[in-house]
Image (cartoon, grey):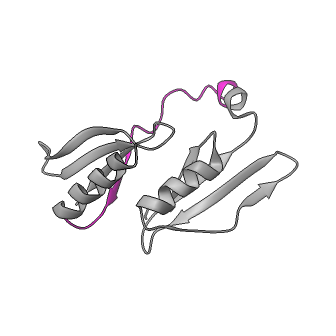
Amino acid sequence: MKIEHIAIWVSDLEKMKDFYLNFFEVSTNEKYYNPKKKFSSYFLSFKKGTRIELMHRPDISEFIEKIDSKLGLAHFAISVGSKEKVDTLTELIRSEGHTVIGEPRTTGDGYYESVIADPEGNLIEITE
């Protein structure tokens, strides 16, 4: 078994797609749009591993409240291959005006990581 993809509800689909394309070496499919539900999405694919699905509806705030979606995913991790790449990418993201939540460090469980927030506040661990 494996995790095939994770899905994230977003307010600004294009901005979020551009963020992940810019920093995380992913490719994207063409935008999917369902006119009946006014639902649109992109799948962001790494060269190998789990994909990220970014999803949007104009009524997303009301939709999430209806399904009582308050608890959930705390963060996800993206491995970049080395400590140096963790450091470099963290600084690049910071220099582009995005928030670094946790500076690069070795955690108690042995990971070398930093934690950043994407433009809508989703937390991403950048790991070696």
Residue 105, placed above or below residue 1:
above
The quarter of the displayed image where residue 65 is located: top right
> Toward the viewer: 46 or 70?
46
Residue visible at 63% across and 39% down in the picture: 11
Residue 86 in percent (x, y) is at 24, 57
Q: Give percent across and percent down for residue 96.
A: 40, 49
Q: Can residue 3 be seen from the camera position used here? A: no
The answer to whether residue 58 is left or right of residue 111 is right
Left or right, 77 with reference to 8: left
Q: Is residue 74 visible?
A: yes
**Residue at the image point whose x is 30% and y is 43% from the top:** 115
Identified at 48% across, 57% down, the residue is 20
For the record, the magenta segment spans 64-82
Q: Give the main secondary structure, helix, strand or loop, of the magenta stretch.
A: loop
The answer to if 76 sits in the magenta stretch is: yes
Image coordinates for residue 107, horizontal then vertical, percent: 14, 44
At x 67%, y 54%, the residue is: 41
Q: Residue furthest right?
A: 36
Check the picture and name the quadrant holding the N terminus. Answer: bottom left
Q: Position of residue 109 (x, y in %)?
A: 14, 46
Residue nearer the viewer, 59 or 67: 59
Which quadrant, please, contains the C terminus? bottom left
